[in-house]
Amino acid sequence: MTFDDKAIEIPETLPMLPVRDIVVFPYMILPLFVGREPSIKAVEDALSKNRLIFLASQKELTEENPSPDSIYETGTVGMIMRMRKLPDGRVKILIQGVAKGRIENYTQTAPSFIVKVKKIEESSTAIPSLEVEAMVRNVKEHLEKIISLGKMLSPDILMVLDDVGDPGRLADLVASNLGLKVQEAQAILETVDHKERLKKVNDLLVKELELLAMQARIRSQAKDEMTRSQKEYFLREQIRAIKSELGEQDTKAEEIDELREKVESCDMPEGIEKEALKQLARLERMHPDASEATMVRTYLDWLVDLPWSKSTEDNFDLARAKEILDEDHFDLKKIKDRILEFMAVRKLKSKMKGPILCFVGPPGVGKTSLGKSIARSMGRQFVRISLGGVKDEAEIRGHRRTYVGAMPGRIIQGLKQAGTNNPIFVLDEIDKLGSDFRGDPSSAMLEVLDPEQNNTFRDHYINLDFDLSNVMFLATANVLETIPQALRDRMEVIQLSGYSEEEKFIIAKKYLIRKQMEENGVSEKFIEFKEDGLKKVISQYTREAGLRNLEREIGGLCRKVAREIAQGNNEKWVITAKVVEKFLGPAKFLREDDLDRNEVGVATGLAWTQFGGEILYIEATRMKGKGAMILTGQLGDVMKESATAALTFARSHAKELGLEENFFSENDIHVHIPAGAIPKDGPSAGITMATALISLLTSNPVRKDVAMTGEVTLLGKVLPIGGLKEKSLAAMRQGVKDVIIPFRNVKDLEEIPEEFRKKLNFIPVKNLSEVLSVALERKIAPLKSVDDKPSVSGHKNRKNRVVAGAA
């Protein structure tokens, strides 16, 4: 049953029924359930008159008692075709839209709405244009596609559309069947022009088509995934059933609970605990066999194992700490004082940043073992990582979790190993860090070793801030030159020099012998080291600044005795000099005392190497030639320059030295440093070369009991050098008594132990004239062109040329 809207006379006022979640269009037939009292009153009012009622949509669907402001003005005049009362008090009506209308005003708002309505006249539809006809066809085609893609519409809709020729009515009919949102449907209802209305409907159909196509693709993908997931689920259920029969339980829930308990109990900072719980929630939603689940589980294991708030309590007993340091290491007074100062400050001020100490010295002098002693004296955990040859920045900062096999860097790994956030952390061989295309690890160390930054150190794998300010970092290095300046600037450098033979003797008796006896299972019942035997091992079987080779040789003696005991010879072995030679073979190093007399053109120099100080003999000779200078002995560029400067000085003072005018043009000079297979370089051989050359040119022998070190300028000035203690040790080993040093190195004598200063006669000089007056056998007149004043008075009594406090 349908109505012709033109045949029905619409009165000026009508009862109004607000509808919640639908927009009623003309010619639309639909059932409505009415439950609100005002709405039931409006229905009864309409039925008592002409059965016409005005239907308008609410703007807010949840509003129970709408006001005129919350109701759209444009609606539809409808006719109540049937009415039925329901047992629960509601009313069900069947209604058909008749015509569009607009509310002009409200004549009554209680107990029900009565409104004055003005009918909206549709625009003319005499002869549709080509554009309108095309849009009509588009609408019908789109609707067919929508139905083919599964949109639930009335099956008769297409047949009905074939009979509809009016474009406006077609637009209303399609809009009423699409199930649009109230706002979208209301916009179409309020559009009077049929062409514009049809265009809006066409746009909505295009949008709906795109959504349905996307939904179809998603459904297809989900179906494939579901098929695979169902298969996996079925297989997992079978595995679970088998495990259940075997008495094994599903551990996923137990694992999640255990991880959650660890996260909550390890006292993480608030932000970090929040991230850990977030990752745990992700893990709980994942399948246990998924690859990402393994990654998240490993990440959580790292988070809960790190010592976020776990620390050891420092022992501030300075007397006990000093006792432990003295027990483990001989001498090293400066370093021990620095550690005790740190503990004293920490005792007075609980919150302080950990110092960054860098121990620099030759191998085997005890740099790494010092860290263990410091940890023991302070009651902290000890961690050591070796940085030698590390070229990848990720070794320090870690790998990002997106990479396969990602893991944290060595800093975080070390903290996990320590189990506390304030260990003694030794960065071994920091001078041997490398760099390549994978990054520069020395730059990554800048943040680690900067007290102003390392309280928020962020490892790429953990990707959360970790406070390193409580860690006491100790770095070790053989040389400072290879450490980048920026990295060196962040550390407090403490130099460790080598040991003299006397110091080695004391250390061996106090520490090394006992240690090697324990390691080789030999007790005092079977072995005893005599003084002459131990000194022979030190002087003739080792030549180093440190103690490693000495410890190896002592260990070798203990093993020889252990073999004798194992073969049934239970007598006690007394290690004398003869027994040492029997067990260890002929001496490996002999003192180079072949200079049994003063030689012309041979000077004794002192050199510094990574393994300590060395004696360096510089030889010079001349032959007939054309003024060439030959340098051999595998010299570096610096030493070649020193030799050239020394020769230039000699030539510039040829007249004062009593040389003939054509001497240099008729003679070649050859400078050689023995042990040609060993590369040699450094800035401290200048005065030695100059002394050897001038000795050669003047035929004045160089004293064999004098060694020297220092660089020389073209004017004959002597420049300061480094490594004075190591060079002094080399001079003592060689039996040299007088050591010529640059005057500016007098301040460094304070760092040389008193027993060294008692055995050596340090002679400070300012210029080469003073060097020659001490080193040459026969006195020569001071070179007039050198304008520096002598640093010592007179040269008659050499024993008086000792710096105050150095003897």
Image (tube, rainbow, N blue to C red):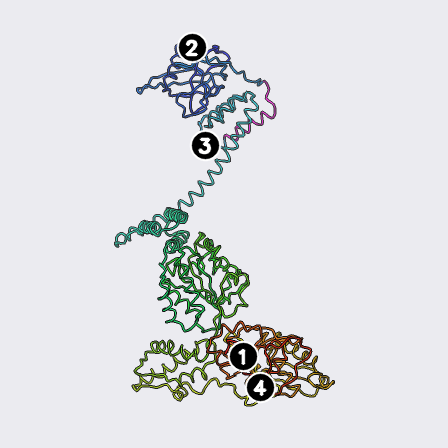
Where is residue 295? Give x, y as percent: 41, 53
Mark sitting earlier along the chain (2/4): 2
Q: Tell me, yes or no, whether the highlighted magenta stretch contains residue 128.
A: yes
Where is residue 273? Give x, y as percent: 39, 48
Quarter holding residue 690: bottom right
Q: CA distance from mark 1 to mark 4?
A: 18 Å
Secondary structure at numbered mark 1? loop
Residue 802's label in the rendered image is: 1
Q: Nearer the viewer, mark 2 or mark 3?
A: 2
Residue type beneath disc 3: Lys
Residue type beneath disc 4: Arg
Residue type beneath disc 1: Val
Q: CA distance from mark 2 to mark 4?
A: 141 Å
Mark sitting earlier along the chain (1/3): 3
Q: CA distance from mark 2 to mark 1?
A: 134 Å
- Residue 731 visible in rendering: yes
Q: Which residues are magenta?
A: 126-143
Q: Is residue 336 left or right of residue 441?
A: left
Circle 2 packing at 10 Å, graded few (<14), some (14-19), many (20+), is some
Q: Nearer the viewer, mark 1 or mark 3?
A: 1
Circle 4 packing at 10 Å, graded few (<14), some (14-19), many (20+), is many
Quarter holding residue 652: bottom right
Where is residue 49? Give x, y as percent: 41, 9
Rendered view: 117 above or below 207: above
Give the residue at mark 4: 703
Rendered view: 126 above or below 660: above
Give the residue at mark 2: 50
What type of secondary structure mainly makes up the magenta span?
A: helix
Residue type beneath disc 2: Asn
